[in-house]
Image (cartoon, grey):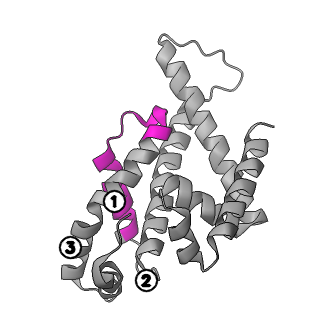
Amino acid sequence: MQPEPDGEITRLLSAFQEGDAAAESRLMDLTYRELRKIAAGHLRRERSARSLQTADLVHEAYLRLAGRSGLPWRDRSHFFQIAAHVMRQVLVDRARKRHAGKRGGSVLQVSLDKALDIAEARSADFLALEDALARLQQVDARQCQVIEMRFFAGMSEEEIAQALGVSERTVNREWRMARAWLYQEVHK
C-alpha cells in the first residue's frame, strides 16, 4: 500500500461519514486500485470462487460497505482492513450458499465433473478457515486482526503495527502464533 498524500483518504472517509456524496466518489477513485489488489488476493486463494471476477468482488464489498451507515472509519488502514474483512465475508457467504445446495444428507452424491469436486472441497476448506477465524476472534481478537490485515488486506507488518498501535515485533509474534493456532484448528 502506498502512503496516502496528506491524509486525503482519511479526510475523505470523515466527509463520507457525514454524507458528502462528492467525498464518496473521490474516495472510490482513490481506493479502487488497492481494493482490486485485495480482491485479487482473495480470489487467488479461493479457487472455488472462479465464477466471481475481481471487479465483482470489489463492487459487492463496496455495496456492503456503503450500506453500513455510521461505520467509524479511523483512517486509511482501518478502511482497508474493514474492506478486506467484508470481501472475505462476501466469499464466505457465497461458499456457504454453494455448500448448502450440495448437502444431500445420506444421499450419495455423484459428480459428473471432477473439477466440481475439487471446487466443492475448496469451498469446504474455505468455510473451515472462516470457522477457525471466528474461534480465533473469541480467543485473541488482536491475532485475528493481524491475520485479516496481513493475509486478507495484504498489509505489511509496519502498516499493521501502525494501525494497531503496537510494535512490528509484536505484530510478527502475533502473526506467527495466529498462523500456528489456525493450522491446528483447520487440521484437527
Judge from the rendering whether residue 128 lies leftward or rightward of residue 13; answer left or right: right
Write down the quadrant of residue 140 in the picture. bottom right
Query: Percent from the top left, x then y, of residue 175?
Result: 67, 58
How many dots with numbers? 3
- Marks 1/2 in contact by CB < 8 Å: the verdict is no
Query: Percent from the top left, x then y, of residue 67?
Result: 37, 70
Q: Give the residues drawn in magenta, as a range.
A: 44-65
In the rendered structure, which disc, 1 or 2, sits on the residue that comes first in sequence?
A: 1
The kind of residue tagged 3 is Ser
Q: Quadrant of the N terminus?
A: bottom left
Label 1 to label 2: alpha-carbon separation: 23 Å
Q: Which residue is mark 1?
A: 34
Q: Residue at x 35, y 66 (%)?
A: 2
Tell which of 96 and 43 is nearer to you: 43
Q: Quadrant of the C terminus?
A: top right
In the rendered structure, which disc, 1 or 3, sits on the residue that comes first in sequence?
A: 3
The kind of residue tagged 2 is Gly
The kind of residue tagged 1 is Glu
Secondary structure beneath dot 3 equals helix
Q: Residue at x 64, y 75 (%)?
A: 167
Q: Which residue is mark 2?
A: 70
Query: Percent from the top left, x then y, of residue 134?
Result: 68, 57
Q: Is residue 8 magenta?
A: no
